[in-house]
Amino acid sequence: MKYIKLFEDFLNESALNLPDGMEQFQKDEKEEGKKADIYLAKFDGKSFKAQSTDKTFDDGVPVTKNFTRGGYKDVKIKGDHYIIEGDTFWYFRIDKTWYAVKQASYQTPPFEY
């Protein structure tokens, strides 16, 4: 007997292992007419400036007004992490912390993707 994959099985196999809240954040941004593309980025451990917040809604989406409260801080991140490329910021989440990097501050992103 030949096994045929169900569409559900295919989706589960190909699903990305995105950080909690990333897909919903992307959906929310797009519904507001904003750019919100998800990419896998490689961080090399070099320092760059970012805003951050640990405050999220129940669905894991960051409370974006809290990004500005702490100002910009030096951040060093290494490894592969998914990012959302928005209209003016790159967003990403590592563990429970969301980061926002202002695109205008960099001629090229502080990571590869």
Image (cartoon, rainbow, N blue to C red):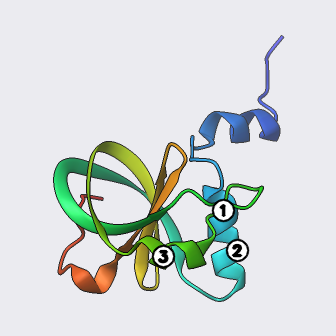
Which numbered disc, 1 or 3, marks the residue closer to the eye?
Answer: 3
Q: Which residue is denoted by mark 3 in the rendering?
A: 69
**Number of on-image labels:** 3
Asked if the residue under mark 2 is in contact with the one under mark 1, i.e. CB atoms within 8 Å, the reply is yes
Residue 81 rendering spot, x and y as whole percentages:
40, 48
Q: Residues within 10 Å of mark 2 (few under 14, many from 20)?
A: some
Task: Give how far apart the Cα atoms at labels 1 and 3 are.
Answer: 17 Å
Cα distance in 3D space between marks 1 and 2: 9 Å
User: In the image, what residue occupies the spot 62% across and 68% down?
Assistant: 26
Per the image, the residue denoted by label 2 is: 28
Pick whichever, 22 or 51, lies toward us: 51
Q: Amino acid at mark 3?
A: Arg
Q: Nearer the viewer, residue 38 or 77?
A: 77
> Relative to 12, is 52 on the left or the right?
left
Q: Are marks 1 and 3 in contact (CB under 8 Å)?
A: no
The numbered disc on residue 61 is: 1
